Image (cartoon, helix red, strand yellow):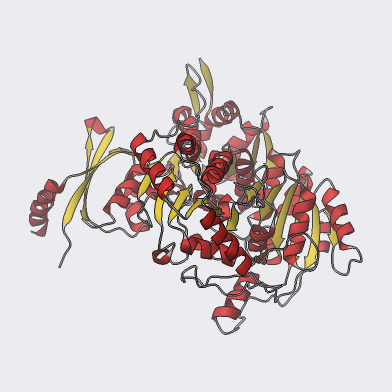
Amino acid sequence: MFSMTGAQLTISLLERQGIRTIAGIPGGANLPLYDALSRSTRIRHVLARHEQGAGFAAQGMARVTGRPAVCFATSGPGATNVLTAIADAKLDSVPVVCITGQVPRAMIGTDAFQEVDTYGMSIPVTKHNFLVREAADLLRIIPEAFTIAASGRPGPVLIDIPRDVQLETVTFEAWPEPGERDPAPAFFDADLDAAVSMIDAARRPVLWVGGGVVASGAGREILELAERASMPVTSTLMGLTAVPHDHPLSMGMLGMHAQRHTNMAMEACDLIVAAGVRFDDRATGKVAEFCPQARVIHIDIDHSELEKLRPASVAILGDVGDVLRAILPKVSPAPRQEWLDYIAALKRAFPSCIPAKGGHATPQELIRRVGELCGDTAVVATDVGKHQMWTAQSYPFRPGMSWLTSGGLGTMGFGLPTAIGAALAAPERKVVCVSGDGSLLMNIQEMATAAEQGVDVTVVLLNNVCLGLVHQQQELFFKANHFSSIYEVSVDFTRIAQGFGWKTWDLAGADDPDAVLREALSHKGPALIHVPVDRGEKVWPMVPPGAANRTMLGGENHD
Amino acid sequence: MTSPRTVLDVLVSNHPGVMSHVCGLFSRRAFNVEAILCLPLNGGAESRIWLLVNEDDRLEQMIRQMRKLQDVHDVRLRPDATETFARLGEVMAD
């Protein structure tokens, strides 16, 4: 027989799940949990400076390892603060288990101090959530939370534990098994055969890969299919590490900030094999006019994504890797020379504006250079804005890298705390965070967390002293009425970072910017590289919001 | 003109958050639900929810989204149950 408090039980169950790091912030309603956590010899606690930072640190751990990671927050404002990071995890399918403290059961519903309806508020932004009504329920709920977070399409799970439940003594006979990922759903051979005949019959097929391919670890299968069937590969923002950026069949990212030739190839294709993608509007543009000539084979592990936005000729529910392994031997090898020649002609007629190699003249070249210096196993995080799109376009992505970006929710402030989480989970890897001045200010307090933990995170700050993408959209679509997008006060980021205990470098006026860059990136520990950027530098090309992907502004490369 | 109606028969775990999960799904995804019936079953471990909904082309997506909810065990179409709502309507109109 075992006997312990709900708080001790929670910590023990987390230990048994293999959790070794938890990011969080203590407060009144989760103090029993923290008291129990202080006695754990296996779990290291990382004290964040804002609960959103804790949530994103957990995301960083989960995104790098592919396994559920845990964050803690107290009731009320602790819970509301962490919800943005949880919503972000929901939209990008990241397995996070968030454990919040709640006011004691007898006080729930009385508008008690630091009480909010965390359960109610978290329903729409979690995969599932629990309000723990008695300590004994933790024996079932904690393993179940990990199973739910990791199974099928991963996602965040929130467990709200009232303070008196944390203090309640529970007696039990045996430990439950840790919660593991359920097996992926089985698929039907008939669907596979239909998919194979469609691929064989297609004259202009395209493979479209998304976050589901990365989550499934199916990059190798994607390449095999691409090479066997001579199918060019395009990617969503979330799928950029699925295939090497310089593979001859790679067409890079599609959609709002695709290269012209990529969107034009999509316009011409007669079959899309959509693998682990969800037809997001940033990728498809006006969905009714997306790939007008194409039939669709849609492979996804989430049944509700199949045919949500576009009818599919064949919809296969399953793990992308499993499905591709079953399809691959059946697909007939084909050269499809005419189609590949057509795409090569598009590339010549509408050349990429992505720099061919790194440099320092433009932010895109600088990002490319950072990629060259950081190596093939780097963890690359971004915030949200121009720098994010430039990184998506110009970073030399390869399958060994981890690419951590807020794709669905588009949360400014994502980058720094997520990079910290990644560095905690993968201390041997180079972690670089490309950020912007608007985004970095939204979670800059986490510089203290990074300094305290001594994590090896390099922030490359592209500073244009404005909200860059807002500025760009105002210029293009609101007659250059730049309202509220330009910062009147220019913040001295290097001094701020130094105040947090960071090492800093500044490319402003540097005689040998590459030497500065190399020195900064070889530093171990939290480092900031400040890069002034012209406000007029745009993200090109751009499909206007709501337009079809054939309507692209800018990005003509006449060099 | 009202579109044809049908009934979704949803078998769920019976605990206080389930109605929020099911009803929230409808408002969140801008699905219409015209009427709701809910009764506990099997001594209270499960509940059966009947939802009177429009029979339109979004119905399949609604069902798939509902099946993703952890507390939803089964979702079936029960077009014959619209009659029950009609009779209840007469009772409640009094």
Q: Residue, x 57% and y 46% (percent of image)?
A: A74
Q: Residue, x 53% and y 32% (percent of image)?
A: A167
Q: Residue, x 81% and y 46% (percent of image)?
A: A525
Q: Residue A124 vs residue A510: left or right? A: left
In this view, A286 is above or below A143: below
Work out whether residue A11 can be spotted.
yes
Q: Which of B2 and A190 lies nearest the eye of the viewer? A: A190
Work out whether residue A121 can be spotted.
no
Q: Residue A80 vs residue A511: left or right? A: left
Q: Residue A139: x and y, percent?
A: 47, 27
Q: Residue A21: x and y, percent?
A: 66, 36
Q: Which of A6 and A347 lies nearest the eye of the viewer? A: A347
Q: Residue, x 40% and y 34% (percent of image)?
A: A185
Q: Residue A306: x and y, percent?
A: 38, 49
In this view, A545 is above or below A446: below
Q: Quadrant of residue B92?
A: bottom left
Q: Which of A490 and A77 lies nearest the eye of the viewer? A: A490
